[in-house]
Amino acid sequence: MTYEWVSITDSADELSEMILQSEQAATYRDAYDSVYSDTQLAREIHDFARLKELYEEVQRFGKYHPDYKRVMKQIRVDKRRLDLNEKVAELRLAENELQDLMDQVSFILGRSVSEAVKIPSSNPFFSSDSSCGSGCGTGGGCSCSA
């Protein structure tokens, strides 16, 4: 390992520590703890995850699956109930804010390497800036704006 590599890894460690100590990360941890310390809510989330597995099985067979109507109705009801839960909504908001921070950091790091670096992002602002824009020849297969 050269001094340059050691410097890069030290900087990466500092950056990750800064992200972990950020307001967005603290808000996310608090929201996560709030959701999963509520045993009833954690059980509902676990049950919903099992229902999602059943939903995926039902989707394979479509309306010909014997439980199609029941599962389709139940998944909508349960998802709506979870979506309306205040703690879950706060967790999603905190998750999105932390993701935005990560997207911004990725964008800055990517652009410091090269303007041509493609940066995966959940934010359309960063995605459109990170696409090749000049036509990659794949017909949009790379998610570029060509």
Image (spheres, helix red, strand yellow):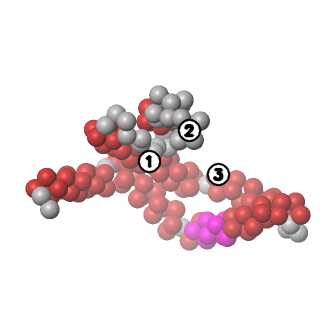
Tell which of 56 and 94 is nearer to you. 56
Q: Measured from the top left, where is residue 103 in percent x and y?
A: 40, 43
Q: Which of marks 2 and 3 is in front?
A: 2
Tell which of 108 and 131 is nearer to you. 131
The earlier-in-sequence mark between 1 and 3 is 3
Q: Mark 1 points at which residue?
A: 99
Q: Give the distance between the C-alpha atoms of the residues marked 2 and 3, in whole angstroms.
A: 41 Å
Residue 14 lies in the magenta stretch: no
Q: Identify which amino acid the numbered label 1 is placed on.
A: Gln
Determine whether the residue tagged by mark 3 lies in a helix, strand or loop: loop
Label 1: how many Cα within 10 Å (few below 14, some 14–19, many 20+) = some
The earlier-in-sequence mark between 1 and 2 is 1
Q: Give the range drawn in magenta.
A: 42-50
Label 2: how many Cα within 10 Å (few below 14, some 14–19, many 20+) = few
- Using the rendered image of the protein, determine whether residue 11 is visible from the camera's viewpoint: yes
Q: Name the residue under label 2.
A: 138
Q: Considering only vertical position in the picture, is 103 above or below 135?
A: below
Q: Which residue is drawn at 14% across and 62% down?
A: 1
Q: Identify which amino acid the numbered label 3 is placed on.
A: Leu
Q: Which of marks 1 and 2 is in front?
A: 2
Mostly what secondary structure, the magenta segment?
Answer: helix
Quarter location, residue 12:
bottom left
Q: Identify which amino acid the numbered label 2 is placed on.
A: Thr
In the rendering, which numbered label is found on residue 84? 3
Determine whether the residue tagged by mark 2 lies in a helix, strand or loop: loop
Q: Measured from the top left, where is residue 50 in percent x and y?
A: 67, 70
Q: Considering only vertical position in the picture, is 113 above or below 4?
A: above
Q: Give the distance between the C-alpha atoms of the residues marked 1 and 3, in whole angstroms.
A: 22 Å
Q: Nearer the viewer, mark 1 or mark 3?
A: 1
Marks 1 and 2: CB-CB under 8 Å?
Answer: no
Q: Measured from the top left, where is residue 126 in percent x and y?
A: 44, 36
Q: Residue at x 45, y 33 (%)?
A: 132
